[in-house]
Image (tube, rainbow, N blue to C red):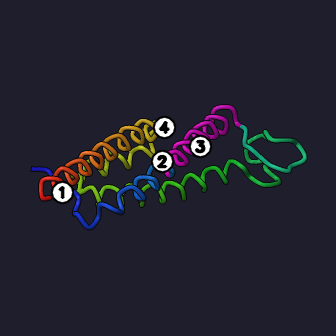
Amino acid sequence: MPLEPKRADIPSIPGALKLYQTSSIITGVFLLLLCAEVILKFGFQYELELGGPYGLLVPRDTVTAFNLSTAILIMHGWFYVLYLFADFRLWSLMRWPFSRFLLIALGGVIPTLSFFLEGRVAREVRAWLSARALSDAEGAEARS
């Protein structure tokens, strides 16, 4: 029998879901930017630079101003940490199996997966919350 969220945790689930959705989209966007940057850097031997004398694209290892390539890498890393925290929070509140946590965590490292998982997870959590609210309303009606 699968575990269900604890009654005391149910009010926290919508906020945890919102944090998960937001971090999922931001992490997914930065992962796509990172993929494009890696292709640009290792496939075409260019890096991204802001404020340099030669424009946005410069030959690899010649960045003299703000290294946008490195900034994208760092920002994806930090947003992935937030994504993992949001994943853990939602996973622990919903009391899903550990394999579910691992699957959702992969969304931050496999390009575009976070977008698909975000929609699927949000639908499932909202459906569970709706079903729970309906059963609570029916239970309150039966008691009165």
Q: Is residue 34 magenta?
A: yes
Give residue 34's mark.
Answer: 3
Q: Of helix, strand and loop, which one carries label 4? A: loop
Q: Which residue is at 80% across, 49% downward?
A: 50
**Which numbered disc, 1 or 3, marks the residue closer to the eye?**
1
The amino acid type, in three-letter code, at marker 2 is Ser
View extreme (front): residue? 144
View extreme (bottom): residue? 8
Q: Badge 2: how crowded within 10 Å, few (<14), some, or many (20+)?
A: many
Quadrant where the C terminus lies?
bottom left
**Which numbered disc, 2 or 1, marks the residue closer to the eye?**
1
User: Magenta stretch?
Assistant: 23-45
Q: Which residue is at 23% across, 63% downward?
A: 7
Residue 142 spot, x, y in % from top left: 12, 53
Sequence-wise first label, 1 or 3: 3
Sequence-wise first label, 4 or 2: 2
The alpha-carbon separation of the residues under discs 1 and 3 comes to 51 Å
- On screen, residue 104 versus residue 54, left or right, reads left
Q: Of helix, strand and loop, which one carries label 1? A: helix
The amino acid type, in three-letter code, at marker 3 is Leu
Sequence-wise first label, 2 or 3: 2
Q: Is residue 43 above or below residue 136?
A: above
Q: Which residue is mark 1?
A: 140
- Residues marked 1 and 4 touching at CB (< 8 Å): no
Give residue 24's mark.
Answer: 2
The alpha-carbon separation of the residues under discs 2 and 3 comes to 15 Å
Give residue 111's mark.
Answer: 4
